[in-house]
Amino acid sequence: MADLPIHTIVFEILTRLPAKDVGRSKSVCKQWYALLSTQDFVRIHCSRSLVSSNQRVLLIDDLTCSVRPIISNNNDYGPSSIVTFPFHHQNNDVSILSHLNGLLCVCLNHTYELLLWNPTTTAFKCLSTPDSHGFYINNLDAIGLYVDADDDYKVLHIKRRSGVLGVYVYSREVDSWRNIPFITRQEYLSPHFNWSAGTFCGGTLYFTVCECWIGGTNVVICFDVNSEQFKEISFPPVPSIGMVQDVLVNVKNVVHMFASTGMFEMTIDLWTLQGDYWIKVLSCPPIPPISLSMWCDITHYVTNGNWFVMTKSGKLFTIEMDMKPFECFYPVSWFRGFKGAVFVQTIVSPSI
């Protein structure tokens, strides 16, 4: 350590600070401000922030927007902190569409505008333009947030309008939208099919496309973020009777899917993608009966061999499992109608 340059020592120490402390450290001197603003520092700091202790849960209701830590020793919510939106909104009418490395892609439902927002630093960037790019329609559009090989944060926006599909990519680096080709089956353009938000993993964005919750056709659409090519792969062989609810998550850079099936008593299986095929990893033990209205309003976290069923007020119950493939918390079911997210605290900026 004594042989290392002081600049290297300072860099190594500062990349391990919490995100909010990094923000405060920028005011120490001009040299530190310049160092902490470089893309190399932001990238390395972000990679070291992707741990469970930096995870937070953001919840939006009609009156407040709050952020809560997840306490690791009892896996419940910690004290909430009220968050003030830095952008204009109406009655908290904000939907969270996608998240990656501390950035949230959100929609202002009263204007349909898309924004990138870092709730830790409060910085945001409006993505909507006068030529009608960056406007999101719920139940018709799909959003995916990703980073390409050049470390450029981008947003993929799939738009369905009157049977016509358009695919657009926003680049943070050049601050503009462009159209890319996408040829798919005509039936997927129908509003009877629901597109999930994109899950970024290993250079690919994954979307589930489901005909409806009860029965119907289910597929997975993959988007290679570097070649910008799409392909379709099969859905896990889940039962076709009853409601099907799926959530894709990136676990240690491998795509996993939580597939919930049933009606009033739900069964949840965890699948992992190997190549273009799904392998079942585990089945959740029986879940106590929950009303459908309650089921659609709760969040399920999995970490370190335990399955935590959470309401916005806190933990409902815990289910123990044999396997322990996780080191962070992951949402297992749809998150309260786009009104919540599990994110990590970083200093990644929504704009250059």
Image (cartoon, rainbow, N blue to C red):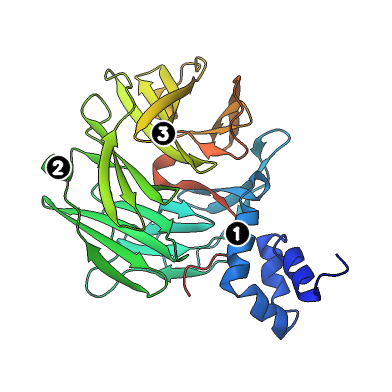
Left/right placement of residue 19 relative to residue 139 reads right
Q: Which residue is mark 1?
A: 46
Residue drawn at (48%, 54%) of the image? 100
Residue drawn at (41%, 36%) of the image? 247
- Earlier along the polypeptide chain: callout 1 or callout 3? 1
User: Could one spot residue 312 in this view of the protein?
Assistant: no
Residue 342: image location, x then y, percent = 53, 46
Local SS, label 3: strand
Q: Amino acid at mark 3?
A: Leu
Q: Which residue is mark 2?
A: 185
User: Could one spot residue 50 in this view of the protein?
Assistant: yes
Crowding near pointer 1: few (<14 within 10 Å), some, many (20+)?
A: many
Gap in Å between the C-alphas at discs 3 and 2?
23 Å
Give the camera-side residue of 305 and 92. 305
| Mark number displayed over residue 273 | 3
Q: Give the quarter of the figure containing the N terminus.
A: bottom right
Local SS, label 1: helix
Q: Amino acid at mark 2?
A: Arg
Crowding near pointer 2: few (<14 within 10 Å), some, many (20+)?
A: few
Q: Are marks 1 and 2 in contact (CB under 8 Å)?
A: no
